[in-house]
Amino acid sequence: MQLVMSRDVLLHAVNLISKASDKRHNMAILGNLKLALTEQQLVMTASDLEVELQATLNLPIGACRQVGQITVPANKFKDIVKLLPEENVSLIVGDDLQCVIKSGKSTFKLGTLPAEDFPMLGEPEKVTPVQIGRDVLSDLMEKTHFAMAIQDVRYYLTGMLFELKDNQLATVATDGHRLALARTVIEHADGAELNAILPRKAVHELQRLLGELKKLLSHHDNQITLNVGHDFLQVILPFGDVDSTGQMQNPVLVSFTARLIDGKFPDYRRVMPHNTDKLAHIKQDQLVNVLRRVALLSHEKTRGVVFYFIDSENLDIKTSNSEHDEASEQLTVKYQGEPLEISFNVAYLLDVLNAVNGDVEFRMGQANGSVLLRQVGDSLHEFVVMPMRI
């Protein structure tokens, strides 16, 4: 195998996919990148058997000197390419199966593992394609990802639900203490339905790629196709340098494939509170500032704060800790209903408040009942927070 190409193009592609590799995996080869070289293309793959990222680069004539394939240590390879002194880099794999990297007067030799041993996830089967705008997909994930469980025996809670029903795509995440729901209309779904749970790492990797794509195409909300199969979700994303005419130069095609969680997500509709006879309108920025101040003296484990809706205009927020420190502040609100005292984990509230961009409304019932939060005038994003006992 022998290749000569631009260091910057190679580094760009490596940066896009290398985070999917996992050197701590019990399969050592998953700490490597797979390089497959043909006359026309270089295909690089990183995987941890949960998320697979594949970058395809079209090569100029003469770049490929000898076809072949090999795997190299992902982190070492990335660090070397990043610091190479010259614009061009050559990769040579000889009979000794060492990968020799040359640039200018610098030479590096890396140990390799056979490409034939690198496990691939495969292609999704029985695909349901969903076309959606890049920014819309980013919004759906951004508004819900924080509510995913980090570790839970209910493994299906450690991911994000993608549900397509009645031409409406919803993303849902919950850890049992709070729930986040975001929706959008899919115009050409043609009655298709799907129910897929994307794992936590896959959610973060897809968010990262969408963020990188937005940097390149900030003025173009390009359409993305989610190919959702029985076991996998796959997305193809185009990367490259955009010139003054809006055309993409040096394109890198990234294929994102994630293994779906095999489980049944709880019916989130049953969690949504309905008997909410108390309503509060609160300015988001003011509430965030008050909570951040008051939370300084909250209990370090429970992080509890008490809301006391006194009358139609006043809300007392207070907290204390085991060292008998106390903090309280009064906030002007618009409140309808009987006086109510209810307690929350302040971190859960701040997560929700950071996901909205305007005044929020709290829809409440009893002090021990779940609370529905959403931005005033926005019915597409809804959040549920369970109260706590202090």
Image (cartoon, grey):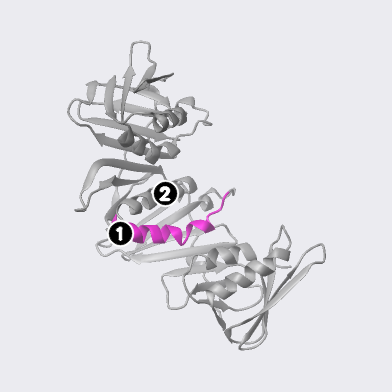
Q: Earlier in the sequence, mark 1 or mark 2?
A: 1
**Residue stretch rendered in magenta on the structure:** 130-150
Image coords of residue 81 (percent x, y): 39, 30
Residue under the point 58% across and 85% down: 335
Q: Quadrant of residue 37?
A: top left
**Mark 1 residue element:** strand
Specify whether residue 300 is in view. Answer: yes
Q: Which residue is mark 2?
A: 208
Q: Nearer the viewer, residue 370 or 265?
A: 370
Residue under the point 61% across and 67% down: 386
Q: Which residue is mark 1?
A: 133
Q: Amino acid at mark 2?
A: Arg
Q: Which of pointers 1 and 2 indicates the residue nearer the eye?
A: 2
Image coords of residue 300 (percent x, y): 72, 58
Quarter of the rendering occupied by the N terminus: top left
Q: Is residue 32 left or right of residue 3?
A: right
Does 244 lie within the magenta span?
Answer: no
Image coords of residue 97 (percent x, y): 37, 14
Specify whether residue 345 is in view. Answer: no
Q: Amino acid at mark 1?
A: Gly
Q: Which mark is residue 363?
A: none
Q: Is residue 107 above or below residue 313?
A: above
Q: Nearer the viewer, residue 222 or 125?
A: 222
Q: Quadrant of residue 286?
A: bottom right
**Within-10-Å neighbours for mark 1: few <14, some 14–19, many 20+:** some
Residue under the point 52% across and 55% down: 148
Q: Is residue 165 left or right of residue 340?
A: left
